[in-house]
Amino acid sequence: MFKTTNLTNTESVSLSKEIALVGVQDTPLMSLLMAKGRVEKSNGKIHTWRERSFDTTSDISQVEGSETTVFQESGRAELNNVCEIFKKAASVSGSVSAISVPGQPNIFAAEINDRLIETKVAIEKALMGGVRNDGSASPYIRRMDGLSKWVDTANKVTGETANVISEKEIKDTVRKLWAQGLATGEYFAIVNADLKEQIDELYKGSYRYIAQENVFGLTVDKLRTNYGDVNFILSRHQDATKMHIFDVNYLSLAFLREPLFEALAKTGDSVKGHVLAELTLKVGSKKAVAEYSLKTS
């Protein structure tokens, strides 16, 4: 746990390891990316990268002894996202700091730990549903595009029956990723509670034991299709009418400033500090994200 013993007014402490461990259940997307090491250094306030697309020349057969005069190259569209600043602060009076609470000897450390969890939740919400703002107009706050804004148009599926998801629609959504030529065949699907309950109900009483007993059951953790395996993640921050399925190998967190704690100058009878992080969501290719939308009317 983060400690604040003997902090000076100018000291900063990295919290990159701590933030990976706190609030995991309430921040599934961020926790997943950090657990899989999908973290990189941002190259500026606007993080820029190249989307890779393979050459689609179908006939590359050649005659024996032919000269090489035709060359292929990967298409590399330039993509970017905005680094968003997240900050939470805590201030504890000298009197509170002097009180010894059983099981919690350092109130300020506990407050900073809570602010760290709250910061991670705020980041999770932005990663899921953020809407881009470059901060050029008042109030000059930069905001990233969340996962929902990175779906390729060809990867969208809409339900056929109002407020009901079907097994076919789930498979159709996974098939969109397969049709884009993604090689891994291992995907993650983020859903809210209502859609997850419907998915569980689809397979209630259907048991197919394929090495693991949790592939099907009352709670569906993993679904195997012809087009790849889908691991379901429950998130309270997901839109209740949508499901996003993605290849995690194409997603990463790009930090301009990794999570850190900084002690603030002492100006009175209190101890102050803040938790700060600056990052964005990098999606290596829009083709790696698919979206299912529940028909609502």
Image (tube, rainbow, N blue to C red):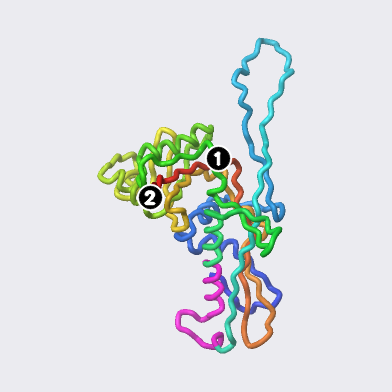
Find disc 1 in the rendering and name its residue. Answer: 152
Mark 2 element type = helix
For the view shown, which residue lies furthest in the front direction?
297
> For mark 1, does the 10 Å Cα neighbourhood hold few (<14), some (14 to 19), or many (20 or more) residues?
some
Q: Is residue 110 magenta?
A: yes
* Residue 213, x across and y down, in percent: 32, 45
For the view shown, which residue lies furthest in the top direction?
64
55 on left or right of 236: right
Q: Residue at x 45, y 60 (%)?
A: 25
Tell me: residue 92, above or below residue 278: below
Principal secondary structure, stretch drawn in magenta: helix
Q: Residue at x 69, y 47 (%)?
A: 48
The amino acid at mark 2 is Leu
Find disc 2 in the rendering and name its residue. Answer: 195
* Residue 78, x across and y down, in percent: 68, 41
* Residue 4, x across and y down, in percent: 60, 76
Q: Residue at x 71, y 58 (%)?
A: 136
Mark 1 element type = loop
184 on left or right of 49: left
Classify residue 267 by image quadrant: bottom right
The amino acid at mark 1 is Asp
Tell me: residue 173, above or below residue 36: above
Q: Residue at x 73, y 17 (%)?
A: 68
Residue 266, numbered circle: none
13 on left or right of 116: right
Q: What separation in Å lies between label 1 and label 2 (alpha carbons)?
A: 22 Å
| Mark 1 or mark 2: whose residue is earlier in sequence | 1
Magenta residues (range): 96-117
Please state which of residues 28 and 198 is positioned toward the viewer in this rendering: 198
Q: Is residue 236 magenta?
A: no
Please state which of residues 130 and 18 is positioned toward the viewer in this rendering: 130
